[in-house]
Amino acid sequence: MDSEDPQERPDDVNNIISGLERYNPEAVGNLEDYLRHQCENRFTDSNANRTLLKLYQLNPDRVKDEVITNILVKALTCFPSPQFTLALHLIPPSLLAPNPRAELPEAIAKLRELSNQLQGAQYARFWATLDSDDLYADLTTDIEGFEELIRVRIATLVSHAYREIDLAVLEQWLGLEGQAALKFVTETAGWTVDDRVVHIPRNPENEAKKSEVREDVNVDMFSRVIRRAWEETV
């Protein structure tokens, strides 16, 4: 998954990103439409989304709260990576400051909490937090298959570190129980379950590798050590 420069990026968006059009306020509409396309088709173009946030910096009158939160939610699906933080740092501080008359600061704070949990591999806590407030459902509603994207990413990371894992632990990490968990594990992830133990196929990431340490020591190195020791005793 290349969220920085995806193959799905159209030529007109690529021209905006790589040329002077990235400073043109009229490019905002095209990039917003492209973000909507990302949300509907389950891929992320972090580079294009950051370009849109930079245009918002230059044109604060064009800022749309919903677009900002959608960019952040899309960045969440790319964990573990710096994409969420990179996007967050492009949002003007005036929009981040707590304001009882503005909803965006609270929304960003909520998404930041989710990001911290995903980055810290606190997956069970992530699902508990996601279910704790209806605001999370509102923030993720525009992102097609958001929960599925998160689960697939978690499964990918699990497959990098484990060959076997208890199904009960995996259920907590995936935020699924019973048949729903079994269906995801066997059909989506393609793993097998035996006596409530999930077996993950061998891959280059989870396969034990023998490490070899070689030290090239020649006669000249020994002679220098011996000479130094002799000189110190004289």
Image: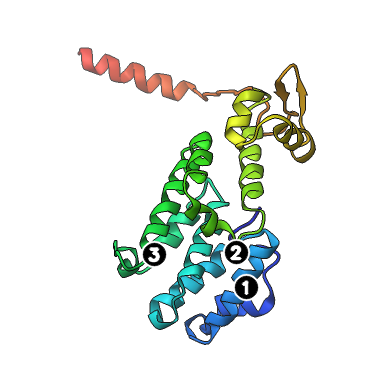
Which residue is denoted by mark 2 in the rendering? 45
The kind of residue tagged 1 is Tyr
User: Which comes before the other along the chain, label 3 or label 2?
Assistant: 2
Label 1 sits on a secondary structure element that is helix
Horizontal and vertical percent position of residue 75: 53, 56
Is 117 rendered above or below residue 7? above
Name which residue lies at 53% across and 63% down: 70
Where 215 sits versus 98, above or below? above
Label disc, if present, on residue 34 of the rendered structure: 1
Residue of label 3: 103
Q: Are marks 3 and 2 in contact (CB under 8 Å)?
A: no
Q: Looking at the image, do the residues carrying marks 2 and 1 touch, with CB atoms under 8 Å apart?
A: yes
Q: Using residue 138 as the reference point, say whether residue 107 is left or right of it.
A: left
Q: Provide the secondary structure element on which disc 2 rests.
A: loop
Image point 70% across, 29% down: which residue?
178
Of the residues shown, which amino acid type is indicated by label 2?
Answer: Asp
Within 10 Å of disc 1 (Cα), the crowding (few <14, some 14-19, many 20+) is some
